[in-house]
Amino acid sequence: MIKIELSNAINGVIKKVIDTQYNGDDQTVEMVTVYELSTEDELQYFLQIIKFLQDVSKDLGLNSGSDYEPNKLVFDIDWGDKYTPTEEEINKRIKDLKEEIKDLNQYKKLLSDIND
């Protein structure tokens, strides 16, 4: 049986995975991971939280989809609903979305060429 213990730390979260049937035997193994959550760099803070959530999901055996499925759970960073972005941030978002649309159109054309 696998047991997951989460504990608060001053600078983050400690995750302990305890496997009581290690290698199919009655051996017990503990794997400890420390997720340091420093608030000095907000982006790194959120990236570490995403890593933590992905790891816990994987440890629990939750199916979050894959790159080869039509649906996949994705942890992402985005603006808050009440956040007012700057003009520069809006322009960057527009540029990124245009690039994504361009990539999707190229992929659509590729699929069309394959099916013809």
Image (cartoon, rainbow, N blue to C red):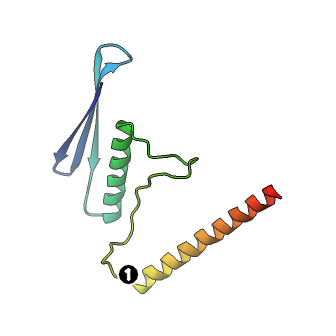
Residue drawn at (44%, 83%), measured in percent from left and top?
88
Label 1, secondary structure: give it.
Answer: loop
Q: What residue would you read off at disc 1?
A: 85
Q: Relative to 34, does residue 78 appear above or below in the rendering?
A: below
Quadrant where the N terminus lies? top left
Residue drawn at (74%, 59%), measured in percent from left and top?
111
Q: Relative to 10, does residue 33 appear above or below in the rendering?
A: above
**Residue 104 coordinates in the image, percent (x, y):** 64, 66
Q: Relative to 99, does residue 19 appear above or below in the rendering?
A: above
| Residue placed furthest toward the right | 116
| Residue placed furthest toward the top | 25
Classed neighbour count for the residue bearing mark 1: other residues with Cα under 10 Å, few (<14), some (14–19), many (≥20): few
Is residue 86 or residue 58 the one in the foreground? Answer: 58
**Residue 82 coordinates in the image, percent (x, y):** 30, 78
**Residue 32 coordinates in the image, percent (x, y):** 27, 35
Quadrant in which residue 103 is drawn: bottom right
Residue drawn at (69%, 62%), measured in percent from left and top?
107
Quadrant where the C terminus lies? bottom right
The amino acid beneath tag 1 is: Pro
**Residue 28 coordinates in the image, percent (x, y):** 27, 20
Quadrant in which residue 106 is drawn: bottom right
Residue drawn at (35%, 63%), measured in percent from left and top?
43
